[in-house]
Image (cartoon, helix red, strand yellow):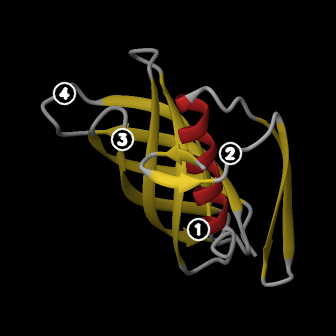
Amino acid sequence: MGDIAGLSCPKISKRTLLLVSFDNSATIAALITHNVSSPVKNLSLATACAFLVATGPVLADPALMLGGTFTFGAMQDPNFGITARLLENDRANESTLGAGVTYYLFTGEIGVDVFAGYLFESGVFGFGYDLVQAAPIVSLGLVNTE
């Protein structure tokens, strides 16, 4: 047995085929190259598997948002960036949750954020928190809604 982040797991050979099924609606298959001697890869594999299992049912009607993000507060200068974000809902006139990546134009830094917003016809507006910049954000973007 191996030890991944304090959890006992069977040791995995050089290549493993991972199949995860969510309510018979979708099957995710990934061929993962795995080195048993690397604790960083073990933790990365465990994190990726947990993320796939946890978010599979949530991503039933996903949508991609492209737009702008503005950081404020956190004792930093305000910053503006271009954002790509995956939203869990694509229906207009409903709330949504999401996660995304932002490239900040003034500093050249990359941010990763979580987001809660409201979908309009072909658009979304909301608030979130950038985990890398450690700052609250406000975003406005375009999205293909139903």
Q: Identify the residue shown where x is 76% and y is 76%.
A: 146
- CB under 8 Å between callouts 2 and 4? no
Q: In this rendered view, identify the residue nearer to me: 114 or 34.
A: 34
Task: Write down the quadrant of residue 67 in the picture.
Answer: top right
Q: Amino acid at mark 2?
A: Lys
Q: Residue at x 74, y 34 (%)?
A: 34
| Category of crowding for the residue at label 1, using alpha-carbon neighbours closer than 10 angstroms: few (below 14), some (14–19), many (at least 20) | few
Q: Give the secondary structure at mark 1.
A: helix
Q: Amino acid at mark 1?
A: Ala
Q: Which quarter of the picture shows residue 22?
A: bottom right
CA–CA distance in space, label 1 to label 2: 23 Å
Mark closer to the observer (3, 4): 3
User: Under tag 2, what secondary structure?
Assistant: loop
Give the CA separation, mark 3 to mark 4.
Answer: 14 Å
According to the image, label 4 marks what residue? 76
Task: Give me the disc on residue 54.
Answer: 1
Q: Amino acid at mark 4?
A: Gln
Question: As shown in the figure, which amino acid type bears the numbered disc 3?
Answer: Leu
**97 vs 38: above or below:** below
